[in-house]
Image (cartoon, helix red, strand yellow):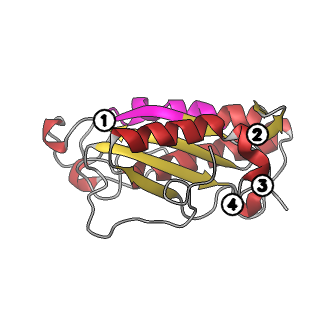
Amino acid sequence: MTYNPDIHHRRSIRLKSYDYSSIGAYFVTVCVQGRACLLGEIAEERMLLNDAGRMVEGWWLKIPDRFPQMALEGYVVMPNHFHGIVTIVVPEHNMPPCGEGCAGYPYGGKTGHRHEGKTGHRHGGAPTVGDVMDWFKTMTTNAYIRGVKQSGWSPFAGRLWQRNYYERIIRNDAELAAIREYIDANPAQWHNDDQYPP
């Protein structure tokens, strides 16, 4: 698959009026700060994950455990970035009731907190794509720091991930199929990727 700016651009196209807790599929990309290749390497058009890359993959796969409204459609860990499709499958009105403090329920309700391993999220109600990505980036950053300290992983400068992430609302089955194809083909297209290091 060739580069398609409608699918695979790096600038945010977040819609100001869109409810990112709405049921639907979203294509997300998060990039390592400075395009540092910390997550593995491409060999013979295949991604070979190192321990850090396997850690990132592991936290991605835990998203439905942390956010039961979310399902995962496809993903790829690349040497210095990550692509994935996350789908919100449960509407807010089908969520269990949640009062002040919301003990035992992972989304925090009216007193929800921001991610960082805590229960809840910043605005209460249904989690958004942003909540999921904030949690994913926090968990992987914390685990990476442990890897640096305990296992000698290459340190990163400042932060592991770039401050923002990129997402696209997937609007139909044809677009979903094209993005799945793009994800699957990403390792083979590494030398043409705009995240390929200079």
Q: Nearer the viewer, mark 4 or mark 2?
A: 4
Q: Which residue is painted at 30% across and 35% down in the image? A: 69
Checking the image for residue 147, the label placed there is 2
Judged from the image, the secondary structure of the residue bearing numbered disc 4 is: loop
Q: CA distance from mark 2 to mark 3?
A: 24 Å
Q: Earlier in the sequence, mark 3 or mark 1?
A: 1
Mark 3 residue crowding within 10 angstroms, few (<14) / some (14–19) / many (20+): some
Q: Position of residue 143 (x, y in %)?
A: 66, 41
Mark 4 residue crowding within 10 angstroms, few (<14) / some (14–19) / many (20+): few
49 and 58: which is toward the camera: 49
Q: CA distance from mark 4 to mark 1?
A: 29 Å
Contact check, label 2 and label 3, Cβ < 8 Å: no
Q: Nearer the viewer, mark 4 or mark 1?
A: 1
Tell me where residue 107 sits by quadrant: top left
Q: Which residue is mark 4?
A: 159
Checking the image for residue 196, the label placed there is 3
Q: Which residue is mark 1?
A: 69
Q: Which residues are magenta?
A: 56-74
